[in-house]
Amino acid sequence: MTKFAPKSLWICFTLLFLICACKKDNLKPMTLEEKIADAKFWYQQETKGTVNYLQSTKKDSILINNEPLWDKVQTEVLTDQTLAIIVPVKTNLYDIAHKNGELNLVISYNGTAKDFKLLNRFKVKNTDTTRLTTLELYNLAFEKEKENSIKKTKILTVNGDKQLTLSGQNLSSTKLPGLGEIKDKLVMTGECTHHFWVEKHWVDGEVVSEEWTYLYSSGCGGNGGAPEEQYPTPGEGGPDPQPQENGTPINLDTSILNNEKAKCALQKMMRVTQFSYFVNPFQGANSTYTLNFGVKTTLTNSEPSARGQTLYFPSNPTVLYINLKRSFVNSAPPLHIAKTLLHEAFHANLLQKVYEAFGTYEINNTWVKKPEYMELNELIDVVEEKSAGTNLLNVMHQYMAANMSVLVDGLVQFAMDNDSNYNDYDIYDYQALAWEGLRETTYFKDNVQNTQIYYVPGTTIHARADSLYDNRLPQMLGKTNVDCNK
């Protein structure tokens, strides 16, 4: 043993030297060039799968091509050591908007804390050649956010050189404007059109979200502009950025806003107590979770018969999506659509709690932490009985089946408030509808399927649960009458 001690000691010293050298390298501050390169890579990853459009209330849209000119980057170090990075952007925005201006990519870089804004500066006059400093451009991009911390946007529009608002030029100038300019401000073209910057995010060929930001207006009088930012509505071809029902903000994709039946079912379901509870973790300005609703032609990784799905993407796990299948929505009555929304909202609620408790959606051997949410106890019991790799969807369905009364109660309230044939239903109709999509669970097969139900009080008329539900469901869906105009 002593024969090998010197060699072993040499290996230990070598490893110790390498470890120290690595630590020394890690402590070495990044150069300016390295920070810019890191910021560029981060920005490219953040905008991967993003497409931009200029879209108007006439519902026409044109692709905006943006090319950051990284060879012309400017930087400045702020007092808090944040690095302000300004990159001019080559874009076709001004050609298609028929306006003069410049677009800059503004990045706030401070180690792992990074943020970016696209700063659009429409020129008030074509002869305007004023250049702003790096610090002035940075302040225009990020000081505006501090003024209104509620509204987050990645594209900021500034009219004039140093204006921080959209109110136009300062009219306190001692020089009177020419007659031509006065005439232009008074003339209206007869059709007021608002134009928006639309940012679409694609994943696997599907648009998963859209963000709309007001850019400018034309034909509205007053220098062809609007006195304040406009917000697109479904009738104008765009979504409301944050429509609200009973204080619950829900992100709605244009696909659901433009589908009358889906929008009707969702708006009415948002007033149901159980549904409000399910989406509660996603509400409020302080929530770190986002829930999006949409209608899709095809559903990702779903059974062919699936009517809806709740999904997430590993790259952004705190954002969840509830999608309805278009062919189902187009043929189903609002009550059936509402039931599917309630079912998927239950999924979203469980997913949010699972992620908050474990930091992952995957069932594996790291799932040992007990959650703070008592309503998850039964779910955790199920999970702990499973081996690594068990499908989370099956686990959630098992939990939902064991808590079927929540879905039934939600459907009762929805029908009571919205269905004119409410008095024609009994508890077994609601159970038949609520169990749809959960009848393959072990819980249903072991505890419900073979139960004999005496469904006519005071008689011996009965049926096995699964047979009764088979008969009741089509009858209820054929009878339901929900008025979407109310």
Image: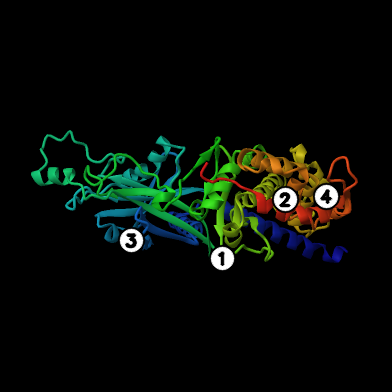
Counting residues from the N terminus, which is met first, the one under dot 4 or under dot 2?
4
Q: Which residue is drawn at 45% across and 37% down?
A: 149
Task: State the residue lying farthest toward the front.
Answer: 459
Dot 2 amino acid type: Leu
Image point (39%, 44%), residue name: 231
Q: Mark 3 points at which residue?
A: 91
Q: How far apart in space, not on screen, are marks 2 and 1 (Cα)?
A: 33 Å
**In front: 254, or 465?**
465
Mark 4 residue type: Val
Nearer to the camera, 422 or 337? 422
- What quarter of the picture does the N terminus occupy? bottom right
From the image, tell me which residue sits under label 4: 382
Q: Is residue 446 left or right of residue 242?
A: right
- Circle 2 sits on which residue? 433
The answer to whether marks 1 and 4 mark residues whose Cβ atoms lie closer than 8 Å is no
Mark 1 lies on residue: 204
Query: Does residue 174 lie above or below 104 as drawn?
Result: above
Going by the numbered disc 1, the residue's amino acid type is Asp
| Label 1 crowd bin: few (<14), some (14–19), many (20+), radius 10 Å | few
